[in-house]
Image (spheres, rainbow, N blue to C red):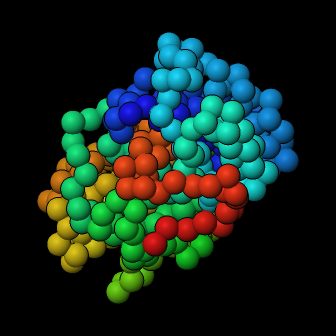
């Protein structure tokens, strides 16, 4: 079964064709990062206009790279939330138009659920339930128990900034540019985590909090007068990264033990962070699954694999499929 996935929830216009819920036939991502970088973050109006320009060429490229025609596609999966309303509308409307024109079934996919399903791309490993999912992206830091396909129970979430958002804000404080995650990771490579920064453990809860850490970094930068050109930027970046990783790794491993799950699934853009994945792989007694970095950040292959399981379990949307910008999971 071949599924065309379409993703336009934020600032990546993406289309991908995935076979039998695992094999990527083509995977095209047009990033708008350079366009938004000068504003220090995503500008929603610009994002949706850029999707309008890019979506058809991206979809065409996904088809031509796959060397197939529309008659070889069995269904269309599209992200309908959460995300920016104007951006989501572009993908959902293109998906509906193509489904109608080609007589194909369509399924609306939750972007957070899609991030989790990236774990089953390009691997022989099959889903193993129940599992514990840590979704860490620009908008979410969710700890979710997955009991089966489409069966989620949210255990915890961030009380303020998402992990990715914290990386982006920390990079801005240190003058490292946007997006902040890769910038902090790179700066940290030449630094030592020698500055003491706080960790919000929120004992007795599966929630996270990163805004206190961000404020502490700001005070550190002011007090120590750390400038972007300063060699101590690397130390500050390493100290910040270490604090985020400590909390995410410790709380998730503890939750997995308490719940007795057999697998931990990492996902979302922050899961592309090398220190985070290494710490999980080296310290978790529970087996860890993590997609390769290019499948952690936004892409449409994860939407297609999630759509594949939707079609398998009869979750088909109608042509009245609408966007849900504040959609959650569980
Ligand atoms: O999943 P994603 O691509 O988009 C959303 O759904 O939000 O995640 C984007 C977030 C951004 O905040 C970005 O700074 C962060 O993921 N990110 C990283 C890394 N790569 C991307 N954070 C830490 N380390 C990275 N290597
Ligand atoms: Zn995402």
Res. 145 image quadrant: bottom left
Left or right: residue 127 versus residue 73 is left
- 50 or 254, which lies in front? 50
Going 40% across and 62% down the picture, which residue do you hit? 150
Quarter-wise, where is residue 220 in the image? bottom right
What is the residue that sits farthest to the bottom in this orientation?
A: 204
Most extreme residue toward the left is: 285
Q: Is residue 177 visible?
A: no
The image shows residue 300 at horizontal and vertical percentages of 53, 38
Residue 243 pos. (x, y %) = 43, 61
In this rendering, does residue 68 appear at all? yes
Count the marks: how many? 0
Q: Is residue 82 above or below residue 186?
A: below
Viewer-closest of 324 and 311: 311
User: In front here: 310 or 37?
Assistant: 310
Quadrant of the rendering where the N terminus is positioned: top left
Q: Position of residue 86 (x, y in %)?
A: 79, 51
Residue 220 against residue 103 in the figure, above or below: below
Q: Position of residue 202 (x, y in %)?
A: 42, 81
Q: Is residue 209 above or below residue 237?
A: below
Does residue 167 appear to the left or right of 206 in the view shown? right
Q: Residue at position x 55%, y 18% from top?
A: 69
Classify residue 46 as left or right of residue 25. Answer: right
For image coordinates 64% across by 26% down, the residue present is: 59
**Residue at horizontal 39%, vertical 83%?**
205
């Amino acid at each position: 079964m071949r599924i065309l996935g379409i993703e336009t929830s934020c600032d990546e216009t993406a289309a991908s064709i995935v076979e039998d819920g695992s094999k990527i036939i083509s995977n095209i991502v047009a990033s708008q990062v350079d366009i938004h970088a000068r504003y220090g973050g995503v500008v929603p109006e610009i994002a949706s206009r850029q999707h309008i320009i890019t979506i058809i060429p991206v979809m065409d490229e996904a088809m031509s790279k796959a060397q197939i025609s529309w008659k070889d596609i069995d269904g269309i999966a599209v992200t309908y939330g959460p995300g920016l309303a104007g951006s989501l509308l572009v993908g959902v409307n293109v998906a509906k138009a193509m489904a109608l024109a080609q007589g194909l079934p369509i399924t609306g996919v939750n972007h957070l659920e899609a991030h989790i399903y990236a774990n089953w791309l390009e691997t022989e490993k099959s889903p193993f339930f129940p599992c514990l999912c840590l979704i860490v992206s620009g908008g979410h830091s969710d700890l979710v128990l997955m009991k089966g396909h489409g069966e989620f129970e949210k255990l915890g979430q961030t009380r303020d900034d998402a992990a990715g958002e914290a990386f982006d804000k920390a990079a801005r404080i240190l003058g490292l540019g946007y997006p902040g995650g890769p910038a902090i990771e790179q700066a940290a490579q030449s630094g030592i985590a020698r500055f003491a920064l706080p960790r919000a453990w929120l004992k007795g809860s599966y929630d996270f909090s990163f805004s206190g850490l961000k404020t502490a970094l700001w005070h550190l930068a002011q007090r120590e007068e750390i400038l972007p050109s300063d060699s101590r930027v690397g130390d500050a970046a390493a100290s910040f990264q270490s604090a985020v990783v400590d909390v995410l790794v410790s709380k998730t491993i503890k939750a997995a033990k308490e719940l007795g799950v057999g697998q931990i699934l990492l996902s979302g853009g922050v899961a592309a962070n090398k220190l985070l994945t290494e710490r999980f792989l080296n310290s978790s007694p529970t087996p860890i699954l993590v997609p390769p970095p290019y499948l952690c950040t936004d892409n449409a292959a994860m939407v297609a694999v999630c759509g594949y399981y939707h079609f398998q379990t009869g979750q088909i949307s109608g042509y009245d499929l609408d966007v849900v910008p504040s959609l959650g999971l569980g």
